[in-house]
């Protein structure tokens, strides 16, 4: 069986997106999926578009042409990388109130946001002693990699970020007028929305990493690269290393937390059943269920191996 080379595109854009166009685009994408091997997760809302999709190059080109048509050729903040395997099972398209859920309806990132900082200038900004750096991602994403000396708000999801800002941000600022606030996330969408929130609250000197960690890892190599660890991604790869290739983490299928190769050697770890994060989270009945599920997965792996190697 010849290896396919799948192209993976992550993108987002904040813009006013009309409901009739959203439904029309969704149907057209499902038609493409029907005829081709297209997978991923796309989220549409009246505030724009967000998502990641995976296919062979010719299919990706069709999808991008279609998206350009429906978004009036706006900047879609695209990041591209490659994988020998599909990184999603199928295509999911969700229509939601927000393309990334923060729960603050009065902000409008397409009209009011912070200053983009590209990868080339990011290092200079975050090394400035007047700058505080905030990781706007969830605690489990931060735990596997982040920029040195960045602040971890320790949120379980992005909708907890506004409360963290209200309760804690001022404690990190020496001077509200002159301190720089630099924010980053995986692909740029969460930190862009976070800058919009801070501007609404009257903060000044607000910056965000354009294209997020994914763009930075693509642009900044070797000793210049100040990102430490791996970058969590919401697909089968779990995390990417500095070369944007699949890293060393997998997912615990019981609790959904990323587990490293070292974590998998711990005595608490049982594949598909438990890890050290969730050792006290589930009942014996739950574990029996997980065990049955894992047996089925293992059986399928053996069967598929036979099909491809016989």
Image (cartoon, rainbow, N blue to C red):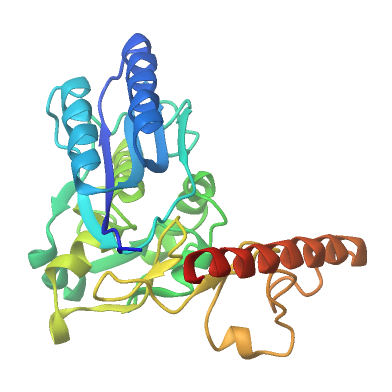
Task: Name above or below for residue 74 compared with residue 137.
Answer: above
User: Residue 160, percent across and down?
Assistant: 54, 48
Please name the residue shown 27% across and 43% down the image: 11
Left or right: 79, with 96 as reference point: left
Left or right: 41, with 280 as reference point: left
- Pick whichever, 129 or 152, lies toward us: 152
User: Residue 168, percent across and down?
Assistant: 48, 58
How many discs mark residues in the rendered view?
0
Left or right: 198, with 283 as reference point: left
Quarter of the view holding residue 256: bottom right
Task: Name above or below for residue 148 compared with residue 262.
Answer: above
User: Residue 48, percent across and down?
Assistant: 31, 28
Please name the residue shown 35% across and 30% down the image: 35
- Pick whichever, 275 or 142, lies toward us: 275
Name the outermost residue toward the front.
310
Q: Is residue 38 visible?
A: yes
Quarter of the view holding residue 155: bottom right
Please name the residue shown 39% across and 55% down the image: 86
Please name the residue shown 47% across and 38% down the image: 101
Left or right: 59, with 104 as reference point: left
User: Residue 100, percent across and down?
Assistant: 42, 39
Task: Name above or below for residue 28 compared with residue 172.
Answer: above
């Amino acid at each position: 069986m010849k290896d396919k080379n799948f192209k993976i595109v992550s993108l987002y854009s904040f813009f006013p997106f009309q409901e009739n166009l959203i439904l029309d685009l969704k149907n057209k994408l499902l038609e493409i999926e029907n005829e081709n091997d297209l997978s991923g997760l796309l989220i549409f809302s009246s505030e724009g578009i967000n998502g990641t999709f995976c296919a062979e190059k010719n299919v990706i080109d069709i999808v991008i042409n279609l998206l350009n048509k429906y978004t009036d050729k706006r900047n879609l903040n695209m990041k591209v990388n490659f994988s020998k395997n599909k990184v999603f099972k199928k295509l999911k398209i969700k229509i939601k109130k927000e393309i990334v859920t923060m729960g603050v309806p009065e902000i409008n990132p397409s009209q009011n946001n912070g200053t983009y900082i590209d990868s080339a200038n990011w290092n200079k900004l975050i090394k400035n002693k007047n700058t505080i750096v905030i990781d706007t991602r969830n605690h489990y994403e931060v735990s596997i990699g982040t920029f040195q000396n960045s602040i971890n708000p320790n949120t379980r999801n992005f909708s907890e970020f506004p409360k963290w800002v209200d309760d804690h941000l001022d404690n990190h600022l020496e001077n509200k007028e002159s301190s720089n606030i630099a924010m980053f996330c995986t692909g740029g969408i969460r930190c862009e929305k976070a800058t919009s929130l801070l501007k609404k609250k009257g903060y000044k000197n607000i910056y965000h990493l354009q294209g997020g960690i994914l763009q930075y890892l693509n642009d900044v190599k070797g000793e210049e690269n100040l990102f430490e660890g791996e970058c969590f991604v919401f697909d089968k790869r779990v995390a990417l290393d500095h070369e944007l290739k699949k890293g060393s983490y997998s997912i615990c299928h019981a609790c959904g937390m990323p587990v490293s190769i070292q974590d998998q050697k711990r005595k608490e770890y049982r594949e598909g059943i438990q890890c050290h994060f969730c050792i006290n989270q589930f009942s014996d009945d739950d574990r029996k269920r997980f065990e049955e599920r894992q047996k089925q997965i293992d059986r399928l792996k053996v069967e598929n191996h036979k099909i491809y190697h016989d």
